[in-house]
Image (cartoon, rainbow, N blue to C red):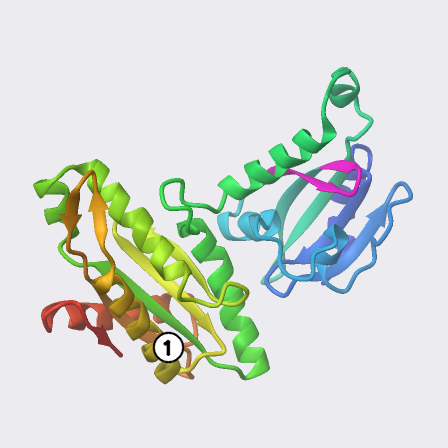
Amino acid sequence: MDIGSIDFQINLLKKIFDLIRIVDPINNKVISVTCNKSIDKIHNKNCYNFWNHNQMCKNCISLKAYNEKETLIKFEHLGDKTYLVMATPIVDDDSTYVVESIKDITDSKIISDSQNIDLVLLYKGVENINKLAFTDELTGAYNRRYINEKLPKDILKSQKNSTPLSLVMMDIDCFKNINDNYNHAVGDYVLKETIKIISKNIRLNSDWIARYGGEEFIIVFKNANIDIAYMLAERIRNAIQNYEFIYNNIKIQVTASFGISSISKKISTKDLLLNDADKYLYHAKINGRNRVEK
C-alpha cells in the first residue's frame, strides 16, 4: 500500500485526533500508525489489541465502515480513558483499507462540565450503545449486521487455519399460524424462548446465533464439519420439539426446520454459504418440516 498517497488526508486528521491508524479490518492488521501524543500499545500486530481484546471487537466500527463504504463514529473506553473513534474507508489501487482516527476525550469539556458524572455508568453506557449496534432488540441474539461483518471473518479464519466451519439456517415451522391463532405477543414469546433453548445447546465461547429475519435464524458452528453440525442441529431440533412453550396458560406446540452447509472449495464465501444452507432449509420444509437436511 502506498501510504504517501493519503498523506494529505492523514495530516488533516492529525490536527484533530491523537492517534491515526490505517488498518486492514478483514485481517485485523495494523498497516500504519501516526501518533500525536503518548498512547500506549499503538504498534500492535492485531488492531483489536489496542483495546485489550484478544479477539475481534464485537462492535468493529472499521469493519462496518469497510462494508458500508461510509464514515462511522463510536465511543470506546480503555481503563480509565474514554475515546472517540472515527473510521473512514479509503481505496488504494484495488484494495480498501480503513483510517481509524482515535481521540482521548476523557478530559474534554463534554466530560469535565459534568461534575457529578459516574464514570462506571459512563463506561456501561458506552458498552450498551456498542452492544445495540449488533444485537437484535427482541431476542438478544446477534442481528443481520453482525452476520454481514462476523461471518466473512470466521470463514476467512477457517480457510487460513484449514479448520471446518458449518452454518445452520433454522426456521420456526408455521410461525405465521402462531401469530394468527394467538397474537404477536405470543409470537414474540416463542421467538425469545427459542433463542434461550438454542443458547443452552451451543458452545458459548465458540458458536454464535443471529436472527436472520422474522422467525429465521442462523447458527455458526466453528471447528465443526457437516456431520458434527448435523448432530448439533438435531439436538437443538429435539430440544425445541420437547420444550413446553406456555404463555398465560396457553400451551403452544413449536417445531423448527434446519438446513446445513459447510465451507468448501465450492462454497467459500458468506453468500454461497447462506444460499446453500437456505437450499437445504427449503428441502426440510417440503419434506415435512421439523427435520434437519444437509
Q: Is residue 276 visible?
A: no
Question: Could you tell whether 108 is left or right of 63 in the image?
Answer: right
Q: Residue at x 48, y 68 (%)?
A: 203
Q: Residue at x 41, y 61 (%)?
A: 200
The correct choice, above or below, for 153 with respect to 116 in the image is below
**In the picture, which quadrant includes the N terminus?**
bottom right
What's the amino acid at mark 1? Ala
Front in this rendered view, residue 119 or 64: 119
Q: Position of residue 44 (x, y in %)?
A: 79, 60
Instruction: Name the residue at the right extreme.
Output: 38
Q: Residue at x 26, y 42 (%)?
A: 188
Magenta run includes residue 72: yes
Q: Quadrant of residue 116?
A: top right
Q: Position of residue 214 (x, y in %)?
A: 26, 48
Q: Position of residue 174 (x, y in %)?
A: 13, 55
Q: Which residue is mark 1?
A: 229
The correct choice, above or below, for 104 with respect to 203 in the image is above
The correct choice, above or below, for 131 with respect to 26 in the image is above
Which residues are the magenta region? Answer: 71-83
Q: Is residue 274 visible?
A: yes
Q: Main secondary structure of the magenta part?
A: strand
Front in this rendered view, residue 68 or 183: 183
Q: How many marks?
A: 1
Question: Could you tell whether 37 is left or right of 194 in the image?
Answer: right
